[in-house]
Image: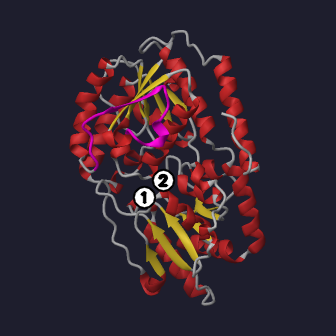
Amino acid sequence: MKIGINGRFLVAKQTGVQRVARNLIATLVAIDQENEYVIFTSKDERGKPEWQFPNVKIVPVDLHIGRVFRNSIWEQISLPRLAKQYKIDILHSPANMAPLFYKGKSILHIHDLCFVVNPTWYSFAFRTWYNFVVPLLTRTVDRVITNSNNSRNDLLLFCQLPVKQVSLVYWAVGDKFRQTQSKEEKTPSPFEYILYVGSLEPRKNIKTLLQAYTQLREADPTIKTKLMLIGTGNPLFKKINLSLGPFADDIILQGFIEDDVLRRFYREAKLVVYPSLYEGFGLPPLEAMASGVPVVTSNTSSLPEVVGKAALTVDPLNGTELAEAMKRGLLDEPLRQDLIRKGYEQVSRFNWYRVARNVISIYYEVYHTKKNGRDAHTVSIPFETWNRLYQLEEEMHNKESDPHATSTY
C-alpha cells in the first residue's frame, strides 16, 4: 500500500494533538517495511531523522508555521490533488481535520468532541466551523479513529455513525518520558513544586486549581510547595482571566516548553495535578507516571479510563476535594510510593508499537474494503506482519524493564 500522510499538523504548534500525531507517524514509518509512506508537509521536515527510511518520501508543499487559514485552504484544495497525483491508496489525517471532498480512501483521527460537550469553551468561529464540518467529515472518510471509549461514544452519538466505522486506538507516552535520567537532569530543583501541564483554556479548569492551591496553603501553613503552570493560551479558545490569589509569589507561569525540557520538569515535580473538565485522552497524567511522579486528576470523561487505579481522582469542580487530594499526594509518603509503582504499571500498557500495530491493521481493513461498503468482506493484517510487530512491542516492554537492553531491529 501507498499511505499518504496529511502533514499539516507538523507545522502547527506542538501541543497534545500534534505531539501524539508526530509520535504515531514516526513509529509507523520506523517499524513498517511493507508499505510506502508519502508525507505531504513543509520542506523543513525533509532532513529530520525520524523520516529517514527507504520507504518514506517527504513531499514539500506550501505549508508554513503560523498561517492557519492558508494551511487550511491547502488541506482542502491542494492535498486531494496531490494524493491523486502520487497515487495514494489511503490518505491518513492524524490531527482532527481532513479534506472534505476527497474521493479516495481515507482515515481520520478525531481526538475529542469538546466543542460539542461544552461550546462555551471555544470561540464562536471555531465551534461553528467544527459543528458543521466534523459530522460531514466522519461520513466522508472510510474510518474514524479515536483514542478512548469516552470519545468513541461521543462520536457515535453526535455523528450518528455505524459502530464499525469508529475504531478505538489508545494513545501512548513518548519515549522521551520513559528514558533514564541523564547526569544533567539529576540536579535537583532549588524548590519543591506541584506541576500542571496543558493549555490555559476554560476546560482545563485552571481557576479551580488555583482556588484549591490557595485552600491547601491556607489550611496548612507548613506547606511551602510552589505551583508551576506549564502552557499557554490558544486563540481558538475563550480567554480566561486568572486570579493567582494570596500566594501569587509562589505560582510560576512557565509558558510553552519543548519535550526535552518538559521531561525534566516532570521528574523534578513533587506532584502532577491535572483537573481537566473534559479530555479525549489526557496525555499529561501518563507522562507524569512515566516520569515517576504521583498524579491527581479528574474523575470525568476519559481520565479514569486512562489512569485506572494509578492516580487520585476527584470531582474537578470541588476545590476542597482537590485541595485534600493534593495534600495527600504531597505528604502521605506510603501513598506516594504506591501511586508511583502503580503509575509505572499503568503507563506500560500504553506504548507506540501497540498503537502503530493497531493502526496498520486498520490500514489493511480499509484498503481491502469497498468504499462505503459496510457489508463488504474485510481483510485483516497478514499474520507475519502482525507477529513481527507484536515481537517489537514485547521487546519494547522488556527494554523498559532493562534500560540497558539494545534493540535488534
Q: Please, what is the three-letter code of the amino acid marked with disc 2?
A: Tyr
Q: Nearer the viewer, residue 328 or 290?
A: 290
Q: Is residue 173 visible?
A: yes
Where are the magenta residues, as a range? 46-65
Q: Position of residue 382 (x, y in %)?
A: 63, 16
Residue at image point 64% right, 53% down = 307
Q: Position of residue 333 (x, y in %)?
A: 75, 74
Image-based side of 53 in relation to 312, left or right: left
Taking 375 as reference, is 237 above or below it? below
Mark seen at residue 203: 1
Q: Residue furthest right?
A: 334
The rendered magenta stretch, by its main secondary structure, is classed as: loop
| Proximity of marks 1 and 2: CB atoms separated by less than 8 Å | yes
Image coloring type: secondary structure
Q: Position of residue 360 (x, y in %)?
A: 55, 26
Task: Give the residue pinned by disc 2.
Answer: 278
Query: In which image quadrant can residue 364 be found?
Result: top right
Is-magenta flag for residue 76? Answer: no
Residue at image point 28% right, 54% down = 123
Q: Please, what is the three-letter code of the amino acid marked with disc 1?
A: Arg
Q: Which quadrant, please, contains the C terminus?
A: top right
